[in-house]
Image (spheres, helix red, strand yellow):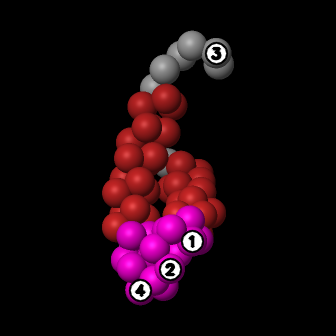
Amino acid sequence: MKRSVAKTISWRIVGTLDTVIISYLITGTLALAVSIGGVELVTKMLLYFFHERTWNNIKWGK
């Protein structure tokens, strides 16, 4: 469980920085880019956590 949480957080940091950079390049507005990144941070962290936990319960490939 702790490993899943740590992986979720570290991956979201990388992913959110990517989203903020891309959003800034598209919009040219740092405040908007950070807002988009903030929303994305929360939603994708939750999605990834539950995705990871689901895959931990699947025996295939272990």
Q: CA distance from mark 2 to mark 4?
A: 9 Å
Q: Which mark is residue 31?
A: 4
Q: Nearer the viewer, mark 1 or mark 3?
A: 1
**First to last magenta residue range:** 21-38
Sequence order check, earlier mark of 2 and 3:
2
Q: Nearer the viewer, mark 2 or mark 3?
A: 2
Mark 2 sits on what residue?
28
Mark 3 sits on what residue?
61
* Position of residue 39 in the picture relative to residue 25 (left or right): left
Percent x, y for residue 6? 57, 59
Name the residue nearer the viewer: 29 or 59. 29
Sequence order check, earlier mark of 1 and 4:
1
Sequence order check, earlier mark of 3 and 4:
4
Percent x, y for residue 59? 54, 16
Sequence order check, earlier mark of 1 and 3:
1
Q: Nearer the viewer, mark 2 or mark 4?
A: 2
Residues under numbered marks 1 and 2 in contact, where contact means CB atoms less than 8 Å apart? yes
The kind of secondary structure element at disc 4 is helix
Mark 1 sits on what residue?
25
Name the residue type under label 2: Gly
